[in-house]
Image (tube, grey):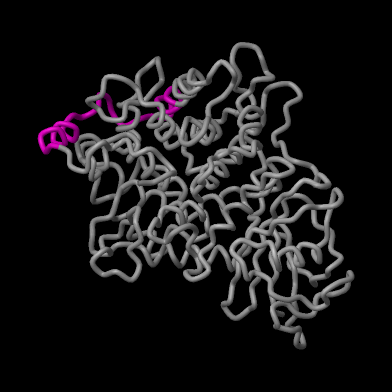
Amino acid sequence: MSPIRPRHRLALAVPAVLTALALAAPPAGATSTPADIATSKTNGVAYLKSLQAADGSYAGSGLSNEWAFSAFAAAGTAVVDVYPGTDTTKNARTVYRNLLSTAAWPSASPVVTDYQRATLNAYAAGIDPARVSASRNLIAQIYGYWQTAEPGYFGPSANFNGTVFAALALVGAKTQAGATRVPQALVGSMVARVRANQHTDGGWAHSKAEGNPAALAQPGDIDMTGAALAALCVSGVPATDTDVVQGKNFLKLKLANASGAFNSLYGANTSSNGWAVAGLNACGINPQTGDFLTPAGKTPVDFLIANQYNPGGGFKYKPTDGVPSAYSSTDALRAVAGGGFTSAPPLPTTAGAPQWVAQPSFTAGTATRLALTVDDGAGGLKVCSVSLTPTGTTTTLGDVLTAAGSGATPSGCVTSVTPASGSGTVTAVNGKANSGSNTWKASVDGSAFTTASRGTVVNVGATIALRWGP
């Protein structure tokens, strides 16, 4: 069971007659036009706005309606512009940021997908996920679930979903300047795991399949194939890549001619279609033409729009349902709007509201976390979340490395640093010394790598990468 999303499928087996009816019932109208899509977006946004509570909230503990934020952003609506009545102080972004900043969030027993879900939606809302508050750094908290014994996986590897969403969150949630904040060595390790879990039919599934021929031979899942395709493509893998093409072909073979639905294991449904279309969108593959236009003239977008109530705007989970589903509506709107699993926040229309909000500096005495990778240049990548309590509004790289020696999750990220004090050039990390042109270099938030120095100033929320090499 995935903590990223509720399992709206109530049973693993769907009666054949219901599945046949769902696939056989063609939606009214022809292939969706740009005007149809624009209307769907307008009405979908109106429906999602209606889900806002009187206090301005969308999210509570556990899974809730915060996925609306990624759908709003894809549809061009700034989350800060969503508020009940005329009270802009209760706008959805401010309320969500306040929730994420509380010590009790997400729960007493969090899992990695809690932080991934929050990263994707905070980013879409215009909240820098690494700088939610003086104590909350969502990027660093994802780093803390790195699997040292199985590099490239985040969270228990059996839950492959956590690794797919690690790529979507860490690579998709860029800096405020639009840069990829994590180093290529980390991106490559996640991509390798996604590739290794592709089933022989070209699809992917929720659970780990790598190294298990029987699992790899099992049918792929529509939803996870969409997510895995998006994970590859946001990580820089081109749409012409063999694994991406095989994933696309898997989806193509699942397309129902009469409706444009993907024939999911759980029957034709809006959420599965939404995830598949989001994956195609992320890869720049048009879900309305070519391989995804059926002989009957239907597309996956047609199926989504056919399941939307208008003018109400909500989307049904299944064609036979009589009421809209809040969760399916976010999946559908995000896809119809052309989005992947997150989008950069649109410019707000509310007077004085900035596009981004972020913690500006450390608060002395307030414990926090920073994200750190250490790449020895020989394939020995270490990833960790570093706990530290700053004494001022900034800290230094030397202090971060010192803190990593005793306060890193997972442990062992930094075992030694030379020099061990001062502000000079770093000459050795974890016993590996500078040698000729191969030296330790540092990057912050995706900047160019430069000579690592203990005295380098480090600001709140920094994503730090150390690398040995030329």
The magenta stretch is: 15-40
The secondary structure making up most of the magenta span is helix
Residue 159 image-quadrant placement: bottom left
Q: Residue at x 26, y 38 (%)?
A: 261
Residue 446 image-quadrant placement: bottom right
Question: Residue 16 lies in magenta, yes or no?
Answer: yes
Question: Closest to the observer: 107 or 350?
Answer: 107
Q: Residue at x 76, y 24 (%)?
A: 352
Residue 146 point in image, percent of width and height: 54, 62
Left or right of 16 in this view: 303: right
Q: Is residue 230 above or below residue 456?
A: above
Residue 134 image-quadrant placement: top right
Q: Is residue 469 above or below residue 102?
A: below
Q: Is residue 296 above or below residue 212?
A: above
Q: Which residue ends up furthest to the bottom in the rendered image?
A: 436
Left or right of 288 in this view: 399: right
Residue 430 point in image, percent of width and height: 69, 78
Left or right of 74 in this view: 445: right
Question: Closest to the observer: 457 or 350?
Answer: 457
**Number of numbered labels in the structure image:** 0
Residue 194 point in image, percent of width and height: 42, 62
Q: Which residue ends up furthest to the left in the rendered image?
A: 17
Residue 148 point in image, percent of width and height: 53, 69
Left or right of 382 in this view: 285: left
Q: Residue at x 69, y 74 (%)?
A: 415
